Image (cartoon, rainbow, N blue to C red):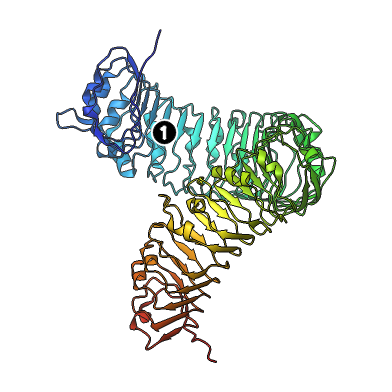
Amino acid sequence: MYLICCTIPRQRFIHYSLSSLSIESSSHLQYLDLSGNYLVGTIPHQLGSLSSLQELNLRYNYRLKFDDKNNHVGGQWLSNLTLLTHLDLSDIFNLNSSHLWMQMIAKLPSIQELKLSSCDLSDLYLHSLSHSRFNFSTSLAILDLSFNTFSSSKIFEWVFNATSNLIDLDLSDNKFNDTIPYDFGNIQNPLQRLDLFGNELQGGVPESIRHICTLKSLHLDGNNLNEDISTILHKLSGCARYSLQYLGLSFNQITGKLSDFSIFPTLISLDLSNNMLRGRIPDGFPKSLESLSFESNSLEGGIPKSFGNLCSLRWLYLSENKLSEDLSVILHNLSFGCAKDSLQELHLDSNQITGTVPDMSMFSSLGTLDLSNNSLRRILKVSTFPYHLENLYLDFNDLEGVITDSQFGNMSMLKELYLSENSLSLIFRENWVPAFQLNTIGLRSCMLGPSFPKWLQSQKLLQRIDISNAKISDAVPVWFWTQTKNLNFMNISYNNLFGTIPNLPIRFYEGSEVFMDSNQFEGSIPLFLQSATFLRLSKNKFSETRLFLCSNNSIDRLRQLDISKNQLSKQLHDCWSHLKSLEFLDLSDNALSGEVPSSLGSLLALKVLILRNNTFIGKLPVSLINCTGLIMLDVGDNRFSGPIPYWLGQQLEMLSLRRNQFYGNLPRSLCYLTNIQLLDLVRKNRG
């Protein structure tokens, strides 16, 4: 027994007709994948000659259709594929033009799975199907109608009348805005999975659903259900409670207090996040539970001691509640039993948890620990973290004291470390080389200095780093700049970093944010910084921009540039024409003089221009008329002269011309600034 497959490689941004593809007829071909090729035109009836075909995937070919001009209407060729078990027509938008192809699919004797996601099917299409009165083959078990525009609850009636052995129905991300039909649970199908995620369903769960004794997975997330949680659990407490394994009710408006969930003995995953639940977390959860999420509610207190005996619990999400118990009590309740060996992710962030961070090494499988945004005060000196920890979030607490390298032990798997916005001092041995390779470091407002942290040299995989306001008073070593080429976020602002920055042959990743403000950097701005997308250099001692502005590095990424409050002087270089993507430019509070170069008018994407508090003279360049998207223009506190420009754009929301030497009448164009929120025309002080 062997399987013969044919997969046509996906071609991006290429459109061609399926009839132009040469697919040799073969009695052995069993699997054909043409997905994601942007095919157009009619599906050729020659596909019907592939008599051994079992799986056909035409997904992501938006402009295909079944109808053709040769009387092979509605996909009649499908009737020859008697062995076809899996058919994926998702993301084909022309299917709603006829219902005949659906009849052909219904007659396929072996069809088991039919995917029609994102096909622009609607209630109007459902109406045409209802009149055809056909039934699918008894082999059909999986039906995916997600991401369409069905809104009528009649879809349930049609589906269950047309099928008899359906076990998986996906109607997520449609437009249902009514209640779930009250007799929903009286269906004859052996339904195991129902997905209604991302609709606008009202009310609650129909009581009849308790009679679906085969139901394993129920997803009602992302709707407008507003029933009390105790009522919902009561409605599920029939025979369905013995089969239910996955229950998703997140992002609704469910109210009330939690009650006993142990009545669902096979429950594996429970998600009630983003609702309106209150009170304490109760005892009574099934031993089978692996994932539990109560995020974004108003739950109080702590975690029951019974959680320590949930030996299958891997993921526990309790973020954004009002939990206020001492952390040592919470961890004790989780660690005295077998849960400490199974728990892989613990999310307790954004609560009101107090106390100290104790030794957590007993959680042998823990990979993610999030205790950020709480009221924790101290990390015990004897504390060590779990050996397998990959992500540690302790930022935004009230933590004080010293962290040493010994507390990280042999944590070779650590990838993300967040300790920002605490009062911690990180004192590491000078030659310490961590066992881990971090991709994210968040140490803002921690005490790292006065020397630049040498241990960072060993971190070769960094993508994000924030060591701002870390009391570092040192020159930045060259090795740090060479490592920045892998970064998409760098914040070293609000330190006392000094010296010149070498012009190195490196480039940041596209979309990178680089914040270096409030330091003592001096000299010339290096060219490689131009490869950032968001660049903040304000409050330094930079004095030269020619290399940065006038050397075209063939990269057009820079969207925001702030060089305010530096020591730039003399006339501004006329080298702006290659920064086509620039949207925000702040050159305020320098000592720039002379006329503003006309090349600023070539920045067609510019939305914000701030030239305040320099000594510019002359007229504003008329080329700025080309910046039609400009919404903020601040040229106050300079020496500009001449009439107020008539060409000021109508999109302006903020305009400041204060304390210059403009003269003459106000132009009529100011009357048409319909979006203006701040207009400052204060004259220059006399004397």
Q: Describe residue 12's horizontal placement relative to residue 447 as left or right.
A: left
Residue 273 visible somewhere in the drawing: no
Q: Is residue 645 above or below residue 539?
A: below
| Quarter of the view holding residue 309 | top right
Q: Residue at x 63, y 62 (%)?
A: 518
Q: Is residue 310 above or below residue 399?
A: above
Q: Describe residue 7's horizontal placement relative to residue 529 as left or right.
A: left
Q: Residue at x 37, y 39 (%)?
A: 118
Q: Quadrant of the C terminus?
A: bottom right
Question: Which amino acid does the dot numbered 1 rest on?
Answer: Asp
Estimate how packed mark 1 is, as few (under 14), some (14 to 19) or many (20 or more) residues with alpha carbons within 10 Å: some
Q: Residue at x 54, y 36 (%)?
A: 218
Percent position (x, y) of residue 562? 53, 62
Percent position (x, y) of residue 236? 59, 37
Which residue is outermost to the bottom? 687
Secondary structure beneath label 1? strand
Q: Is residue 602 above or below residue 277?
A: below
Give the residue at mark 1.
144
Question: Closest to the observer: 468 or 544?
Answer: 544
Give the tally of numbered discs. Answer: 1
Q: Residue at x 33, y 42 (%)?
A: 120
Residue 447 visible somewhere in the drawing: yes
Percent position (x, y) of residue 535? 53, 57
Which residue is outermost to the top? 1
Q: Quadrant of the N terminus?
A: top left
